[in-house]
């Protein structure tokens, strides 16, 4: 991979990481606000459903933060853009679509077909 491509992906991933971390800070701040009293049980249930939904989103973002950090580490150690399964280069188009990917499209497709066949 060319140096300018690595710089592009490093900046892209760093920006994404900063964005995700700022959302995490907002969630923590929002969750520490004192609990509200709801006279209506329906309002309380709605509030809890919204809170649970937000927590699920933040959990997914937490997992993505880990993947972004690992991708940045791969840039530093020179393995970014290489498929961890077959060792071939991952296409730039695939990396632009999913910069945290660790597999080329062929290996990922085979993995997904296998998972579907095994019911995983």
Image (tube, helix red, strand yellow):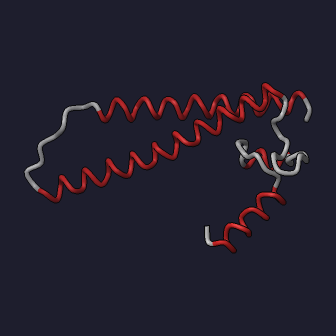
Residue sitting at the far front: 118
Q: In the rendered image of this protein, does residue 101 appear above or below residue 74?
A: below
Residue sitting at the far top: 76
- Which image quadrant: the N terminus? top right
Residue 66 falls in which quadrant of the image? top right
Q: Nearer the viewer, residue 72 or 15?
A: 72
Looking at the picture, how far across and down is residue 17, in whole percent? Answer: 60, 31
Q: Is residue 21 left or right of residue 31?
A: right
Looking at the picture, how far across and down is residue 27, in whole percent? Answer: 39, 35
Q: Is residue 104 left or right of residue 63?
A: right
Looking at the picture, how far across and down is residue 23, in whole percent? Answer: 47, 34
Q: In the rendered image of this protein, does residue 27 appear above or below residue 87?
A: above
Residue 89 falls in which quadrant of the image? top right
Q: Is residue 41 left or right of residue 73?
A: left
- Which image quadrant: the C terminus? bottom right
Q: In the rendered image of this protein, does residue 105 appear above or below residue 10?
A: below
The residue positioned 79% from the left and 50% from the top of the image is 103
Q: Nearer the viewer, residue 108 or 55?
A: 108
Looking at the picture, how far across and down is residue 14, in whole percent? Answer: 66, 28
The residue positioned 38% from the left and 52% from the top of the image is 53
Residue sitting at the far bottom: 117
Q: Nearer the viewer, residue 18 or 90?
A: 90
Q: How many marks?
A: 0
Q: Nearer the viewer, residue 76 or 27?
A: 76
């Amino acid at each position: 991979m060319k140096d300018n491509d690595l710089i592009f992906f490093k900046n892209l991933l760093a920006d994404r990481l900063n964005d995700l971390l700022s959302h995490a800070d907002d969630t923590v701040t929002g969750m520490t606000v004192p609990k509200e009293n709801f006279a209506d049980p329906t309002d309380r249930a709605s509030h809890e459903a919204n809170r649970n939904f937000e927590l699920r989103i933040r959990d997914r973002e937490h997992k993505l933060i880990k993947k972004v950090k690992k991708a940045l580490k791969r840039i530093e150690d020179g393995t970014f853009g290489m498929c961890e399964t077959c060792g071939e280069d991952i296409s730039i188009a695939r990396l632009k679509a999913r910069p945290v990917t660790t597999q080329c499209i062929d290996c990922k497709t085979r993995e997904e077909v296998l998972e579907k066949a095994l019911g995983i």
